[in-house]
């Protein structure tokens, strides 16, 4: 049987390498629909990461490579460049996939060909092992093209979590992968996908988003200041340009 493939892309750098074994175990626990398999593209962001020391050497689905330090967004795009799957799934090295996550993503995109991408409910995984959810998730089902941009214009945040993205390969290629920004490149990709295609939201938890002191989201420039303003401007202009071009009369 010829297997269909979902490519899981994971950037890894610095302290986050120590979480790779747990991410791997969460991948191993996934039960995929008949005829599907996964590959894992682990991308070392810079020198001295040594991801292989934290992962088994006998699983041919794991493919590790390295690139010059460019940040996690560049590393994700480099991993995409090595991938072969028809679907592209984001998984950060410090996050976990609950049971059934990949199957729900695949099923949503197979059953709803009008959708180009899918996101899921997220639980924050706190350092003490407890979890925390959100109360702003949209209803399960279709996310109409342009709805994420409309929400983002008002709140400067998406109503769905970009770290849970699973998208059709051709759309990720069309958009050039993740925006090469110091942070928020996954939100940039989400806004781009929203501009060109309907999405889908799975209301079941699709990711455990680990909170820890070494995240780039803890950086003081992440949510205010000149860098933040520039990131927001780049994301807004690209999303609005794509939306206008796709919907031009």
Image (spheres, rainbow, N blue to C red):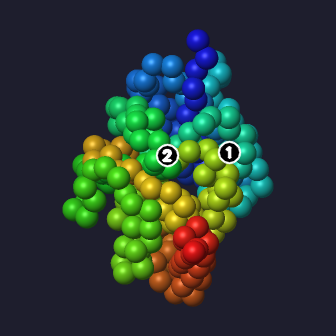
- What is the crowding at mark 2: few (fewer than 14 residues within 10 Å), some, or many (at least 20)? many
- Furthest toward the left, the residue is 135
Q: Is residue 201 visible?
A: yes
Q: Is residue 238 above or below residue 135?
A: below
- Furthest toward the front, the residue is 249
- For the N terminus, the image quarter is top right
Which residue is located at x 67 percent, y 56 percent?
Answer: 174
The front one of 98 and 154 is: 154
The front one of 128 and 154 is: 154
The percent position of residue 30, horizontal first and vertical second, equals: 42, 27
- What is the crowding at mark 1: few (fewer than 14 residues within 10 Å), some, or many (at least 20)? many
Q: In which quadrant of the rendered view does residue 111 lie? A: top left
Query: Disc 2 versus disc 1: distance between alpha carbons?
Result: 14 Å
The percent position of residue 22, horizontal first and vertical second, equals: 45, 35
Which residue is located at x 63 percent, y 40 percent?
Answer: 42
Say which residue label 1 marks: 79
Say which residue label 2 marks: 166
Which residue is located at x 58 percent, y 74 percent?
Answer: 248
Q: Which mark is residue 32?
A: none
């Amino acid at each position: 049987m010829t297997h269909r493939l979902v490519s899981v892309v994971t950037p890894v750098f610095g302290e986050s390498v120590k979480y790779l074994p747990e991410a791997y175990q969460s991948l191993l626990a996934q039960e995929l629909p008949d005829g599907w398999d996964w590959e894992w593209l682990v991308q070392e962001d810079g020198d001295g990461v040594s991801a292989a020391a934290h992962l088994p050497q006998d699983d041919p689905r794991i493919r590790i490579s390295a690139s010059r330090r460019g940040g996690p967004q560049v590393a994700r795009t480099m991993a995409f460049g090595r991938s072969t799957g028809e679907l592209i799934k984001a998984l950060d090295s410090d996050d976990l996939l609950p049971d059934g996550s990949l199957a729900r993503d695949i099923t949503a995109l197979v059953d709803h060909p009008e959708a180009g991408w899918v996101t899921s409910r997220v639980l924050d995984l706190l350092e003490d092992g407890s979890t925390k959810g959100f109360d702003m998730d949209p209803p399960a089902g279709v996310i109409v093209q342009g709805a994420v941009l409309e929400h983002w214009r008002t709140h400067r945040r998406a109503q769905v979590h970009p770290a849970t993205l699973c998208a059709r390969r051709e759309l990720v290629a069309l958009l050039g992968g993740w925006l090469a920004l110091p942070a928020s490149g996954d939100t940039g990709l989400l806004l781009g996908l929203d501009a060109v295609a309907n999405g889908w939201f799975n209301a079941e938890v699709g990711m455990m988003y680990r909170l820890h002191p070494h995240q780039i989201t803890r950086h003081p420039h992440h949510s205010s200041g000149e860098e933040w303003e520039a990131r927001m401007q780049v994301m807004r202009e690209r999303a609005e340009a794509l939306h206008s071009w796709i919907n031009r009369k």
